[in-house]
Image (spheres, rainbow, N blue to C red):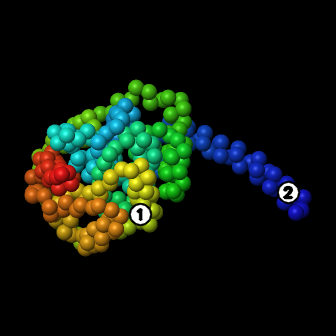
Amino acid sequence: MSKNIKKFIVRLLVFTPFSVAIYCIMICIWGDFAPYFLKKNLFFDKSSSGLLHTRLHEVRNIANVDVLVLGSSHAYRGFDPRIFKEAGFNMFNLGSSAQTPIQTEVLIDRYLDRLNPKIVLYEVYPNTFSFDGVESALNLLANDAIDLQSVKMCIKIKHILPVNTLIYALYRDVLNKDAGYKEKAYSGDTYIKGGFVEKTKVEFNTAKHKKAKWEFNDLQVESFKNVLDKLKEKGVKVYLVNAPIPKDYYNSVSNNAEFDKLMQSYGTYYNFNGKVDLNDSIDFYDSSHLNQTGVVKFNEKLLATIFKN
């Protein structure tokens, strides 16, 4: 190896950590002072329609539940702990907006031992298997601890937006800049202890959906397997649950049977689409989510089906 090459390697080794440090400092300054429209590769917002900050603040004081719910917004807006309590189950809902299996894996690594559930209801919305995981990662980075799991998540997603947000979130966490933050519910939402968000809006105008097909991201399927393996190691009974969506939306998708077959290959699976007597206009508040009247009907059917014994 020539002297010039050795000098280059030495300079590179010295310059790289210096450059990384400067980059991190600039991200923190940019996050604090740059106007919103210039932050295309940095997004930090603690508020969300899913009230994740409130849910994660509560879960840190919860232990030893009967039932743990995991999944997307269909989870935290579709599984009501009050209905489960009436049936004799202590339940906590750890769903989050657009939660993909990548984020589910992070959450169970952090909270599974504390919650120590006997049963997990894993809400499996087919669309979350196609997402890149960026949206849910940003939500989690802004509202939960920054740790090794956060770093692993960002490496797995391979997108600059979560990486920059991770740096900025760590800076705010270290300086305790969000101490005393209190999350406000969006209009029409009510947070219910146990991780549930109740929607008081009664109905919506149905809309026709274009023909579509569920897509499956290999990275999400891999994380999904990891989640199931970790739950199995803990001896937790897992039920995979496909929560109901409006009939027109569900029927517009051509490969529902393919998704059913995929889920059945991984464990005990229930698809409640077409199994609950729901009216698209009356029991949903938008083109994807149940309102409270729909939640009651769905939960009663779920309890009668899964926990009939």
Residue type, label 2: Lys
Label number found at residue 6: 2
- Which image quarter is the N terminus in? bottom right
Comparing 233 with 129, the one in front is 233
Where does the image place residue 138, in percent across and percent down from the top left? 43, 47
Q: Residue at x 89, y 62 (%)?
A: 2
Residue 49 visible in the displayed image: no
Where does the image place residue 198, in percent across and percent down from the top left? 20, 41
Comparing 59 with 293, the one in front is 59
Q: CA distance from mark 2 to mark 1?
A: 44 Å
Residue placed furthest toward the right:
3
Relative vertical location of residue 216 with respect to residue 288 in this rendering, above or below? below
Residue 61 visible in the displayed image: yes
Please give the residue where the numbered disc 1 appears in the rendered image: 221
Q: Residue at x 27, y 61 (%)?
A: 269
Q: Is residue 222 toward the left or the right of residue 68 in the image? A: right
